[in-house]
Amino acid sequence: MATEGTNLSGYNKALLPNGEKFRVGIVVSQWNEDITSSLYKGAFDTLLDLGVKPVNIIKWEVPGSFELIYGCKKMQEQMVNAVIAIGSVIQGETKHFDFVCDAVAQGIKDLNVNRETPVIFCVLTDNNKQQSIDRSGGKHGNKGVEAAVAAVQMADLRMKA
Ligand SMILES: Nc1c(NC[C@H](O)[C@H](O)[C@H](O)CO)[nH]c(=O)[nH]c1=O
Ligand SMILES: CC(=O)[C@@H](O)COP(=O)(O)O
Protein backbone atom coordinates (compact mmCIF):
# COMPACT_ATOMS: atom_id res chain seq x y z
CA MET A 1 0.00 0.00 0.00
CA ALA A 2 1.35 3.43 -0.87
CA THR A 3 1.39 6.29 1.64
CA GLU A 4 -1.52 7.78 -0.32
CA GLY A 5 -4.63 6.68 1.56
CA THR A 6 -2.85 6.00 4.84
CA ASN A 7 -1.71 8.35 7.64
CA LEU A 8 1.86 8.10 8.84
CA SER A 9 0.93 9.59 12.20
CA GLY A 10 -1.68 7.05 13.22
CA TYR A 11 -0.98 4.66 16.11
CA ASN A 12 -2.84 2.95 18.96
CA LYS A 13 -0.85 3.64 22.15
CA ALA A 14 -2.70 0.88 24.03
CA LEU A 15 -1.25 -1.71 21.67
CA LEU A 16 2.36 -0.51 22.06
CA PRO A 17 5.07 -1.24 24.63
CA ASN A 18 5.81 1.32 27.37
CA GLY A 19 8.96 3.21 26.43
CA GLU A 20 9.92 4.30 29.95
CA LYS A 21 12.84 1.86 30.11
CA PHE A 22 14.31 2.69 26.71
CA ARG A 23 17.10 5.02 25.54
CA VAL A 24 16.74 6.13 21.90
CA GLY A 25 19.34 7.80 19.69
CA ILE A 26 18.21 10.04 16.83
CA VAL A 27 20.63 11.02 14.03
CA VAL A 28 19.33 13.91 11.91
CA SER A 29 20.58 15.06 8.49
CA GLN A 30 21.01 18.83 7.99
CA TRP A 31 20.15 18.70 4.27
CA ASN A 32 16.56 19.99 3.74
CA GLU A 33 16.59 21.09 7.38
CA ASP A 34 13.00 22.38 7.27
CA ILE A 35 11.84 18.86 6.48
CA THR A 36 14.19 16.97 8.80
CA SER A 37 13.40 19.25 11.76
CA SER A 38 9.68 18.48 11.31
CA LEU A 39 10.44 14.76 11.14
CA TYR A 40 12.55 15.07 14.31
CA LYS A 41 9.79 16.91 16.20
CA GLY A 42 7.30 14.23 15.22
CA ALA A 43 9.65 11.51 16.43
CA PHE A 44 10.63 13.30 19.66
CA ASP A 45 7.04 14.12 20.66
CA THR A 46 5.88 10.57 19.93
CA LEU A 47 8.70 9.01 21.95
CA LEU A 48 7.64 11.16 24.92
CA ASP A 49 4.00 10.14 24.38
CA LEU A 50 5.07 6.48 24.47
CA GLY A 51 6.85 6.95 27.81
CA VAL A 52 10.46 7.54 26.81
CA LYS A 53 12.07 10.07 29.19
CA PRO A 54 13.54 13.27 27.61
CA VAL A 55 16.91 12.53 29.22
CA ASN A 56 16.93 9.20 27.37
CA ILE A 57 16.61 10.73 23.90
CA ILE A 58 20.04 11.53 22.39
CA LYS A 59 20.16 13.72 19.26
CA TRP A 60 23.11 14.08 16.88
CA GLU A 61 23.25 15.95 13.56
CA VAL A 62 25.15 14.97 10.39
CA PRO A 63 25.70 16.99 7.14
CA GLY A 64 23.57 14.88 4.79
CA SER A 65 21.70 11.61 4.49
CA PHE A 66 24.80 9.80 3.25
CA GLU A 67 26.45 10.56 6.61
CA LEU A 68 23.54 8.96 8.46
CA ILE A 69 25.28 5.63 7.95
CA TYR A 70 28.38 6.60 9.92
CA GLY A 71 26.41 8.62 12.48
CA CYS A 72 24.05 5.72 13.20
CA LYS A 73 26.95 3.29 13.45
CA LYS A 74 28.52 5.45 16.18
CA MET A 75 25.12 6.02 17.85
CA GLN A 76 24.68 2.24 18.13
CA GLU A 77 27.75 2.30 20.40
CA GLN A 78 26.07 4.73 22.84
CA MET A 79 24.19 2.13 24.90
CA VAL A 80 20.82 2.90 23.30
CA ASN A 81 17.97 0.45 22.70
CA ALA A 82 17.18 1.77 19.23
CA VAL A 83 18.39 4.37 16.72
CA ILE A 84 16.31 6.50 14.35
CA ALA A 85 17.94 7.80 11.13
CA ILE A 86 16.20 10.97 9.88
CA GLY A 87 16.85 12.39 6.40
CA SER A 88 15.19 14.02 3.42
CA VAL A 89 16.49 13.26 -0.08
CA ILE A 90 14.85 15.13 -2.97
CA GLN A 91 15.40 14.37 -6.65
CA GLY A 92 17.58 16.94 -8.44
CA GLU A 93 18.81 17.15 -12.02
CA THR A 94 21.20 14.22 -11.91
CA LYS A 95 21.47 10.58 -10.84
CA HIS A 96 23.00 11.65 -7.49
CA PHE A 97 19.59 11.12 -5.86
CA ASP A 98 19.63 7.45 -6.86
CA PHE A 99 23.10 6.86 -5.48
CA VAL A 100 22.43 8.64 -2.17
CA CYS A 101 19.11 6.86 -1.60
CA ASP A 102 20.50 3.45 -2.44
CA ALA A 103 23.63 3.92 -0.37
CA VAL A 104 21.71 5.08 2.70
CA ALA A 105 19.14 2.29 2.45
CA GLN A 106 21.84 -0.35 2.02
CA GLY A 107 24.03 1.16 4.73
CA ILE A 108 21.26 1.26 7.31
CA LYS A 109 20.20 -2.25 6.31
CA ASP A 110 23.76 -3.38 6.95
CA LEU A 111 23.77 -1.79 10.40
CA ASN A 112 20.64 -3.78 11.25
CA VAL A 113 22.12 -7.02 9.91
CA ASN A 114 25.62 -6.72 11.36
CA ARG A 115 24.91 -5.16 14.77
CA GLU A 116 22.48 -5.70 17.63
CA THR A 117 20.85 -2.27 18.00
CA PRO A 118 17.92 -1.70 15.57
CA VAL A 119 18.16 1.33 13.28
CA ILE A 120 14.87 2.75 11.99
CA PHE A 121 14.81 4.12 8.41
CA CYS A 122 13.14 7.53 8.62
CA VAL A 123 14.57 8.86 5.35
CA LEU A 124 12.19 10.49 2.89
CA THR A 125 13.16 9.85 -0.75
CA ASP A 126 10.90 12.17 -2.70
CA ASN A 127 10.47 13.31 -6.30
CA ASN A 128 9.78 16.88 -5.20
CA LYS A 129 9.54 19.15 -2.15
CA GLN A 130 5.76 18.92 -1.91
CA GLN A 131 5.96 15.16 -1.39
CA SER A 132 8.41 15.82 1.46
CA ILE A 133 6.11 18.41 3.04
CA ASP A 134 3.15 16.04 2.76
CA ARG A 135 5.07 13.32 4.68
CA SER A 136 6.64 15.47 7.42
CA GLY A 137 3.49 16.83 9.06
CA GLY A 138 1.38 17.48 5.97
CA LYS A 139 -1.60 15.68 4.47
CA HIS A 140 -0.05 12.23 4.81
CA GLY A 141 1.04 12.73 8.41
CA ASN A 142 4.57 12.64 9.79
CA LYS A 143 7.03 9.82 9.07
CA GLY A 144 8.86 10.80 12.26
CA VAL A 145 5.84 9.61 14.25
CA GLU A 146 5.87 6.30 12.38
CA ALA A 147 9.62 5.97 13.06
CA ALA A 148 9.24 6.59 16.80
CA VAL A 149 6.56 3.91 17.06
CA ALA A 150 8.79 1.48 15.16
CA ALA A 151 11.75 2.34 17.42
CA VAL A 152 9.83 1.48 20.60
CA GLN A 153 8.48 -1.73 19.05
CA MET A 154 11.92 -2.84 17.89
CA ALA A 155 13.57 -1.91 21.21
CA ASP A 156 10.98 -4.09 22.93
CA LEU A 157 11.55 -6.93 20.47
CA ARG A 158 15.31 -6.75 20.99
CA MET A 159 14.87 -6.89 24.78
CA LYS A 160 12.74 -10.05 24.45
CA ALA A 161 14.68 -11.79 21.69
N1 LIG B 1 21.00 16.07 -2.32
C1 LIG B 1 20.83 15.65 -1.02
C2 LIG B 1 21.89 15.24 -0.23
N2 LIG B 1 23.17 15.25 -0.72
C3 LIG B 1 24.33 15.24 0.15
C4 LIG B 1 24.76 13.83 0.58
O1 LIG B 1 23.82 13.26 1.48
C5 LIG B 1 26.12 13.89 1.27
O2 LIG B 1 26.00 14.71 2.43
C6 LIG B 1 27.19 14.45 0.38
O3 LIG B 1 27.24 13.70 -0.84
C7 LIG B 1 28.59 14.41 1.05
O4 LIG B 1 28.92 13.09 1.40
N3 LIG B 1 21.69 14.81 1.03
C8 LIG B 1 20.41 14.79 1.57
O5 LIG B 1 20.24 14.41 2.73
N4 LIG B 1 19.35 15.19 0.79
C9 LIG B 1 19.51 15.62 -0.49
O6 LIG B 1 18.50 15.96 -1.16
C1 LIG C 1 19.84 13.99 -3.89
C2 LIG C 1 20.84 14.94 -4.41
O1 LIG C 1 22.04 14.83 -4.20
C3 LIG C 1 20.33 15.97 -5.37
O2 LIG C 1 19.34 16.73 -4.70
C4 LIG C 1 21.45 16.88 -5.85
O3 LIG C 1 20.89 17.64 -6.88
P1 LIG C 1 21.49 17.50 -8.38
O4 LIG C 1 21.19 16.09 -8.83
O5 LIG C 1 20.73 18.54 -9.20
O6 LIG C 1 22.98 17.80 -8.31
Image: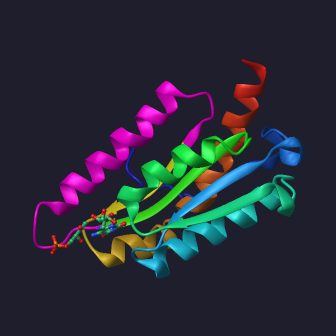
- Residue 11 visible in rendering: no
Q: Nearer the viewer, residue 69 or 105?
A: 69
Judged from the image, the quadrant occupied by ligand 2 is bottom left
Q: Residue at x 29, y 47 (%)?
A: 103
Would residue 111 be counted in the magenta stretch? yes
Task: Tell me the chief SS of the magenta region.
Answer: helix
Would residue 137 be counted in the magenta stretch? no
Q: Is residue 126 above or below residue 81?
A: below
Q: Position of residue 137 (x, y in %)?
A: 55, 73
- Residue 15 visible in rendering: yes
Left or right position of 65 against 141: left
**Where, quadrant-wise, is the N terminus in this rendering?**
top left
Span shown in magenta: 90-119
Q: Is residue 18 above or below residue 53?
A: above
Q: Position of residue 79 (x, y in %)?
A: 74, 41
- Name the colouring of the figure: rainbow
Q: Is residue 94 above or below residue 104?
A: below
